[in-house]
Image: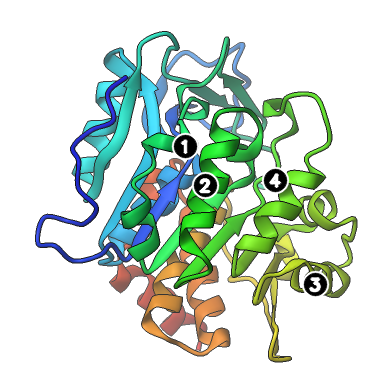
């Protein structure tokens, strides 16, 4: 298995602003909206996978980013690594797994709120084959933000590798747990014990009501936020769809921000844009309300576009949306 170039920092020796870890694959989206897959005949090919998109989103905003993942040893894998580099994301820790093909995900696009996903990750996705001893613990520890997901806990050896990365952090900097509940990607057994272990090692948790319920048993926004804080994080961010977003900090600060009005084309990448922009705001040291408003604007921009990775906005685009909302 190839794991890319060695070394724990970027080319100039500085630590990364953001390292993400987990799912990567090729997204194939119909180029016409409102068309079922059975009738679609033209598709766009895009870099996909939530952690990959978050890294791209932050890179678009000027952050130094890298990703830890695996692809198949095939042309789609080569495509994904080239796309990461093209977006400015360091791919040194995106290696190849010869025995498993690069995953493909199809989506049906029925605006404004129905976007079924079809994951092709069998017999097993390469990004679930990351071994604990392959983690560059020094780089993970030194990154200003580390981002991991619930899917990374869904199977071994990725589960052990993800927990090893969290333990290497020792709550240094900002460690984000994207709850990212995808039931079709899990092995048998309850995810709750693994979510609890990850929450105890993270400083920020991000998820929607369903994901919060999987992680804590609570789905009402304030109850869910309280449960996430009780589980160990310092900041709980609960995404509420058309009702906006709630964030509660351990210091008692609670902020609710409404969504940015937008004509939705494809809502799938909005959460990833939100995540990358949230990391950008936290890195900048902004007040919590400003972070959330900025992240909401980034998410709205992507929801108004067809793709995910290529749709991630640049800083001037986010600022334009924020200015229009004032």
* Residue 232 versus residue 194 in the image, above or below: below
Crowding near pointer 2: few (<14 within 10 Å), some, many (20+)? some
Residue 91 showing in the rendered view = yes
Q: Work out whether 201 lies above or below 44.
A: below
* Few, some or many residues within 10 Å of mark 1 (<14, 14–19, 20+): some
Q: x%, y% of residue 272?
A: 50, 53
Q: CA distance from mark 2 to mark 3?
A: 22 Å
Out of 155 and 181, give the one closest to the viewer.
Answer: 155
Give the answer, above or below, for where 315 lies relative to 188. below
Rounded to the nearest angstrom, the CA distance separating label 4 from label 1 is: 38 Å
- C-alpha distance separating marks 4 and 3: 32 Å
What is the secondary structure assignment of the residue under circle 2?
helix
Of the two numbered discs 3 and 1 on the same chain, state the one appearing first in sequence: 1
Q: Earlier in the sequence, mark 1 or mark 2?
A: 1
Question: Which disc, if any, is residue 311?
Answer: none
Numbered mark located on residue 164 in the image? 2
Of the residues tagged 4 and 1, which is closer to the observer? Answer: 1
Q: Earlier in the sequence, mark 4 or mark 1?
A: 4
**Who is closer to the viewer here, 166 or 124?**
166
Q: Earlier in the sequence, mark 4 or mark 2?
A: 4
- Residue beneath label 1, please? 132
Residue sitting farthest toward the left:
12
In the picture, measured across the screen, residue 131 lies left or right of residue 106, that is left
Q: Which residue is mark 3?
A: 230
Whether residue 12 sits left or right of residue 181 in the image: it is: left
How far across and down, in percent of the image, does residue 314 sit? 30, 64
Marks 1/2 in contact by CB < 8 Å: the verdict is yes
Number of the label disc, if any, that sits on residue 113: 4
Label 1 SS: helix
> If the image is split into quadrants, where does the N terminus sit?
top left
């Amino acid at each position: 298995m190839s794991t890319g170039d060695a070394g724990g920092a970027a080319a100039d020796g500085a630590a990364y602003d953001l390292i993400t870890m987990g799912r990567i694959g090729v997204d194939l989206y119909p180029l016409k909206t409102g068309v079922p897959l059975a009738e679609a005949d033209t598709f766009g090919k895009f870099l996909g996978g939530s952690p990959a998109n978050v890294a791209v989103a932050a890179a678009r905003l000027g952050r130094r980013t890298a990703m830890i993942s695996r692809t198949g040893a095939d042309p789609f894998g080569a495509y994904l690594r080239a796309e990461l580099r093209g977006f400015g994301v360091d791919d040194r820790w995106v290696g190849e797994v010869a025995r498993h093909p690069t995953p493909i995900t199809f989506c049906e696009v029925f605006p404004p709120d129905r976007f079924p996903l079809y994951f092709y990750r069998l017999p097993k996705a390469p990004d679930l084959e990351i071994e604990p001893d392959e983690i560059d613990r020094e780089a993970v520890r030194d990154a200003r933000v580390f981002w991991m997901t619930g899917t990374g806990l869904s199977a071994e050896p990725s589960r052990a590798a993800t927990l090893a990365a969290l333990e290497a952090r020792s709550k240094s900097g900002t460690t984000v747990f994207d709850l990212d509940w995808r039931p079709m990607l899990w092995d048998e057994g309850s995810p709750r014990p693994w979510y609890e272990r990850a929450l105890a090692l993270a400083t920020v948790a991000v998820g929607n009501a369903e994901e919060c319920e999987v992680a804590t048993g609570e789905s009402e926004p304030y109850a869910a936020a309280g449960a996430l804080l009780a589980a160990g994080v310092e900041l709980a961010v609960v995404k509420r769809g058309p009702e906006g977003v709630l964030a509660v900090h351990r210091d008692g600060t609670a902020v609710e921000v409404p969504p940015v009005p937008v004509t939705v084309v494809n809502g799938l990448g909005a959460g990833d844009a939100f995540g990358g922009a949230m990391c950008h705001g936290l890195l900048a040291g902004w007040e919590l309300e400003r972070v959330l408003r900025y992240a909401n604007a980034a998410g709205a921009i992507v929801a108004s576009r067809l793709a995910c990775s290529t749709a991630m906005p640049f800083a001037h685009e986010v600022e334009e949306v924020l200015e229009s909302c004032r």
